[in-house]
Image (cartoon, rainbow, N blue to C red):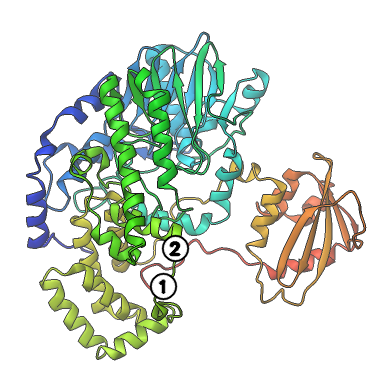
Amino acid sequence: MSSAISDPSPFIVDQNTRAAQEPGLADPQDQQDADRGFIAALEPGIVHDADGKVVWDNDSYGFLTGTCPSSVHPSLWRQSGLNIRQGLYEVTPGIYQVRGLDLSQMTIVEGDTGVIVIDPLVSAETAAAGLALYRQHRGDKPVTGLIFTHSHVDHFGGALGVIGVDEVTERKVPVIAPSGFLEHAVAENVYAGTAMARRAAYMYGAVLPRGPKGQVGSGLGQTASIGTVTLIDPNLDVTHTGQEETVDGVRITFQITPGTEAPSEMNFYFPDHRALCMAENATHTLHNLLTLRGALVRDPHVWSQYLTESINMFGRDSDVVFASHHWPTWGTDRLVEYMSIQRDLYAYLHDQTLRRLNQGYVGSEIAEMIELPPAVAGNYSTHGYYGSVSHNVKAIYQRYMGWYDGNPAHLWEHPPVEQAVRMVDFMGGPEAVVAKAEAAYDQNDYRWVAQVLNYVIFADPSNEAAKALQASTFEQLGFGSENATWRNVYLMAAYELRNGNVGTPTATSSPTMLAALSVEQVFDALSLRLDGVKAWNEKAISDWHFTDLERTHRLELRNGVLIHYDLPEAGGLPDPEVTFTLTRATLIGVLLAGQDIQEALKSGALQVEGDAQSFLKLTALFDEPDPNFAIVTP
């Protein structure tokens, strides 16, 4: 099959030409806001790691300064052009942002003796480059506080690029995060991390060439850097709304917002600056209620309620609102309206989905029915560059009703391959299906072509004609999409059909991420790798005594399940077959990080009393996740 990318079809060219006539595209306000406060750019806009590998290249998006081509939706071209603005910006006196050096933005607040860093990007290398850019223009000030707004990696991954763990300890630097941050930060990246990372390769288009027929951004930012992901444990939890802290002379009032854009998240207000940080709860796009990479379904109802609370608590006393993505909004009236539109967006999607749900419509039907109110749809901060009305409505349906739509015909369908074989046979065989798909392609019915060709490919993955036509179909769907993540997903699918499986280009976890796991989370992660069928008839009991935690945790294998719990003081349990004595770090090393158990035994880091083989023989019952599983082929 040819690896050449298709040209946009006349249908897509016409669609994008008409979209370019939208009057809002010419409104200069967002461009003015995105440029306001500019101080200096990083020159060149490229960041390397210690080995010289490029981990961030904003300059590769220079083509976005040109005229929008027919292969990109003009609204997405506009959004990406705003996102590539790069450098150090003043938000308001004493508050600065480093933008365009990663998927997220890093905010720096000047205190009495140093600076407070908010959300240090994805990678240590990009965070270090951003802080160096600030220091070049504002002075070499120490980091006197670190704040993580929420539990997603683009808001804490660069922590060690701005301050070291020893420095935090020695200088007693506050590391502030919302309650539950650490648990959710590591759980998301460890429990389902492999599958999420593989799908994220599609969502962000990590290996796509950057250009008019390739990756032009991800709507929320351009893409994620590929440097070293790190984590520093918080030492100050924000547990309730209204909590006030003073860090290096800077007063901060917090609002916790769990269950919004992340399970652990918070907004906060700087009263002396009249500045409000909205974390990722109000950005210049419709956000995801369920990301295409996978996650827990978010709650738009509570999201909208927290936005109302933010407006009432802080909005009318603010001169500027900023987030950890995109650009700020200035002026009290403007920012209150901006936050209100964002609030109305999530509330409307929630309420109207539930209204239709209770009339008997299913998620895929409701997704085609809902139109946003004119005042909401006409505001570009609500456009689906990252999330979309379509997949967010389906997420709301899933949150309330689950995967089953109530039709018994869908209750026990065949899995994809078996279904595809039967479907293709019913439709007259693969040659007939491909011929009919070609006719539908010529009629610009790309959604239907993608569906029927998927049956052929899953029934016969060697069918080159089907894969070539499917690749072209996905490219047309991508070229016509206003949503950056949809574009990336479609173009990545086409790329793999033409070039083969690219696997997962980014690591699913890092040493500092693993190091943050609790004892319970380590054993939870281990249990997810147990081959239940192989373990049906196996039984084992082991105790794990942690010298650094002064606790003993029991691990039981029975009925294909690993059960674990702290030993109760009352006793009365059967004796273990073996007791291991170790630290939490050693547990993480030998069970999850690849440390050799025999070496740990020899060094004394792991001590054994009893029959060690009773546990070691169980290693044959565990398997490894596959970061390279197929997506568009069986």
Report the residue marked by disc 1: 406
Q: Residues within 10 Å of mark 1 (few under 14, many from 20)?
A: few
**SS under mark 2:** helix
Report whether 175 appears left or right of 522: left
Sooner in the amino-acid sequence: mark 2 or mark 1: 2
- Residue at the image position 67 percent from the left and 23 percent from the top: 169
Quadrant assignment, res 280: top left
State the image coordinates of residue 594 (x, y, percent, origin top left): 66, 54
Report the residue marked by disc 2: 401
Disc 2 marks a residue whose amino acid type is Met
Quadrant assignment, res 7: bottom left
Report whether 340 appears left or right of 607: left
Q: Residues within 10 Å of mark 2 (few under 14, many from 20)?
A: some
State the image coordinates of residue 86 (x, y, percent, origin top left): 30, 29
State the image coordinates of residue 541 (x, y, percent, origin top left): 83, 63
Quadrant assignment, res 472: bottom left
Give 344 or 596, whichever is nearer the viewer.
344
Locate the N terminus and report the quarter of the image it occupies: bottom left
